[in-house]
Image: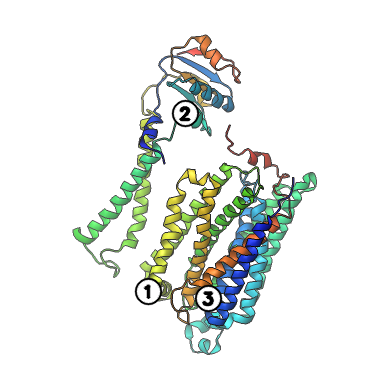
């Protein structure tokens, strides 16, 4: 099967987007370096989420023995290089920006705070960096090995069986869940070191799934409208749309659970999180996020006609990747607003960084996809996936 | 957007085969082709029998959208409104109490129950409309073809056709066309 060629026009758009992102980051450092560090953390975490989602979707596909998603499996598989991009951005933050973001790295604050002293066995710089290295490298290593085996499947009898792929996928799912818990607590939750909730990693995971499905829809639509993925039809997009709808509901469910339990129990170490986000300029921002991250996509995606039309579906997905970014801004900026983030949390710099992230993700995924066989023809369920619910 | 007229036109309600012909079909593909042929011949009273749901059979039979989702949506709205408004009424005017230091009108705590009653009422509405449209709950029913509940498919044509017309209409399908007079 002929490999997909990324159109020059698309690549040029991605270069422009990446340039906008880099420019707004640089201008941001000149204007307000505190805000720029926070913006960089948002971008790094957002890109990491999409990269991890690719591995998660592929692993889930193998573990559950899915057949419908075989046709476009190469797209989520090609997302893994985003983990490296995110690792570079996280490394920049760890080397140069930790003092600007994490208040527990300041020794004078640490020494005068009884609560933080008790947490210092976990919250200290060397252990933090060791954890970051461990989770980033193990995610990438397992995802890389999984993709390599999956591509080898096209060789026919020499390739691995689906059982082998399911085994490595199970390993990926375990490190995905456990290390994402660590990563979300380290990178975002420790911005507010006095606050704690066990629901938080789940909220981060829900956000990653929501944004990830939106990216799969957008990238497969982009490939399809440029002449690739010919075997993918409206049935596949319908199911992707159903997943997008399901995870819109799931995000709302987790966000509400966290909110309601915090409100009900009324414990000081938990309520500080909502207290910060429900006052001043943040109140309208929070309500806007809840309405447009949950209610709006949920109502639009109920239509089955829309989900079967990939042009319409990708418009909803375009909104979803944006609001997914806003959600990460809400998490990170809300945590450090006390030390220096003033005014409305979403301004030109955040929008520029969002465009840059889209450029990096689009460029990385499409060009990785263009290097391999566009459809996994060696998969035993390939034909079944092509003829999935076809019209007669 | 589906208009109400479209919905009414496509309203499917089960009809007991009382006259006409029943043709046993051997696979799902042929059933869909057969349904298309009967639909294109302009026959209004006909039905398909299958042991499991088949994709696209609805389009092949010329039915438009089913009523079930609309009735489910009405059930969902009724349940949600009922739960939220009744709790609001109880907590603010009928019997206001302070529990756990929270004000009488504490809407976050209403939402789980609102959600649950929404689901419950949706389930009742869906079950009810399904029983109604399928004419279920009937005490006795005449079996026309016994295999349609396990591995067989059948088309019923409730029209005054001769046996040879039925055979001509459905020829070329994977079936021994042997219409049974109902």
Judge if badges 1 and 2 mark residues of a common chain: no
Q: What's the chain of the residue with tag 3?
A: A
Q: Quadrant of the C terminus of chain A?
A: top right
Q: Which residue lies under the disc numbered 3? A: A190
Chain under numbered label 2: B
Which residue is located at x 51 percent, y 76 percent? A191
Counting residues from the start of the chain, the first of labels 3 and 1 encountered is: 3
Label 1: which secondary element: loop
Q: Are marks 1 and 2 in contact (CB under 8 Å)?
A: no
Q: Which mark is residue A279?
A: 1
- In the image, A65 versus B175, the foreground residue is B175
- Relative to the observer, which residue lies in front, A54 or A289? A289
Rounded to the nearest angstrom, the CA distance separating label 3 from label 1 is 21 Å
Residues under numbered marks 2 and 3 in contact, where contact means CB atoms less than 8 Å apart: no
Give the spatial CA distance, label 2 vs label 3. Answer: 59 Å
* Residue depicted at x 49% and y 52%: A246
Crowd band around label 2 with a 10 angstrom C-alpha radius: few (<14), some (14–19), many (20+): some
Instruction: Name the chain letter of the residue that bears numbered label 1.
Output: A
Q: Quadrant of residue B158?
A: top left
Q: Does any portion of residue A123 appear in the rendered image?
A: no
Secondary structure beneath label 3: helix
The residue singled out by tag 2 in the image is B62
Measured in 3D between alpha carbons, the distance from the residue under mark 1 to the one under mark 2, in whole angstroms, is 56 Å
Give percent across and percent down for residue A135: 64, 68
């Amino acid at each position: 099967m002929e490999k997909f060629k990324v159109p020059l026009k698309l690549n040029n758009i991605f270069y422009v987007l990446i340039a906008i992102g880099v420019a707004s980051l640089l201008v941001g450092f000149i204007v307000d370096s505190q805000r720029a560090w926070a913006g960089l953390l948002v971008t790094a975490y957002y890109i990491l989420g999409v990269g991890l989602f690719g591995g998660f979707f592929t692993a889930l596909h193998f573990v559950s023995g899915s057949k419908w998603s075989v046709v476009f499996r190469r797209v989520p598989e090609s997302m893994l290089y985003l983990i490296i991009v995110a690792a570079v951005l996280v490394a920049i933050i760890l080397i140069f920006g930790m003092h600007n973001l994490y208040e527990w790295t300041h020794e004078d604050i640490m020494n005068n705070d009884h609560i933080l002293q008790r947490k210092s066995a976990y919250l200290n710089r060397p252990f933090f960096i060791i954890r970051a290295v461990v989770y980033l490298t193990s995610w990438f290593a397992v995802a890389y090995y999984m993709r390599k085996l999956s591509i080898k499947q096209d060789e026919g009898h020499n390739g691995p069986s689906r059982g082998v792929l399911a085994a490595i996928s199970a390993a990926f799912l375990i490190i995905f869940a456990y290390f994402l818990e660590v990563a979300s607590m380290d990178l975002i939750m420790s911005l507010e070191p006095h606050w704690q909730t066990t629901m938080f990693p789940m909220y981060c995971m829900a956000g990653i799934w929501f944004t990830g499905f939106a990216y799969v829809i957008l990238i497969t639509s982009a490939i399809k409208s440029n002449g690739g993925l010919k075997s993918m039809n409206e049935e596949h997009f319908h199911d992707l749309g159903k997943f997008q709808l399901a995870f819109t509901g799931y995000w709302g469910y987790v966000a509400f659970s966290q909110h309601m339990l915090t409100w009900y129990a009324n414990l000081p170490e938990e309520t500080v999180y909502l207290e910060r986000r429900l006052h001043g300029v943040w109140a309208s921002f929070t309500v806007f996020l809840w309405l447009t991250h949950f209610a709006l996509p949920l109502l639009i995606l109920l239509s089955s006609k829309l989900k079967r039309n990939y042009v319409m579906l990708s418009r909803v997905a375009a909104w979803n990747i944006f609001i997914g970014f806003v959600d990460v801004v809400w998490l990170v900026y809300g945590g450090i607003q006390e030390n220096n983030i003033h005014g409305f949390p979403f301004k030109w710099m955040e929008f520029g960084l969002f465009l840059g992230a889209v450029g990096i993700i689009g460029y990385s995924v499409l060009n990785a996809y263009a290097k391999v066989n566009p459809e996994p023809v060696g998969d035993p369920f390939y034909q079944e996936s092509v003829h999935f619910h076809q019209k007669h | 957007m589906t208009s109400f007229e479209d919905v009414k036109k496509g309203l499917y309600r089960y009809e007991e085969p009382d006259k006409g012909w029943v043709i046993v079909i051997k696979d799902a593909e042929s059933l869909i082709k057969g349904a298309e042929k009967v639909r294109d011949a302009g026959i209004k009273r006909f039905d398909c029998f299958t042991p499991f749901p088949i994709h696209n059979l609805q389009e092949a039979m010329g039915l438009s959208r089913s009523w079930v989702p609309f009735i489910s949506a009405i059930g969902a709205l009724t349940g949600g409104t009922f739960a939220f408004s009744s709790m609001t009424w109880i907590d603010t005017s009928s019997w206001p109490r302070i529990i756990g230091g929270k004000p009488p009108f504490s809407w976050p705590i209403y939402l789980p129950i609102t959600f649950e009653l929404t689901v419950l009422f949706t389930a009742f509405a869906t079950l009810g409309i399904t029983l109604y449209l399928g004419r279920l709950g009937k005490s006795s029913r005449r079996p026309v073809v016994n295999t349609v509940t396990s591995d067989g498919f059948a088309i019923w044509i409730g029209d005054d056709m001769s046996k040879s017309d039925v055979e001509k209409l459905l020829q070329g399908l994977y079936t021994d066309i042997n219409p049974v007079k109902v």
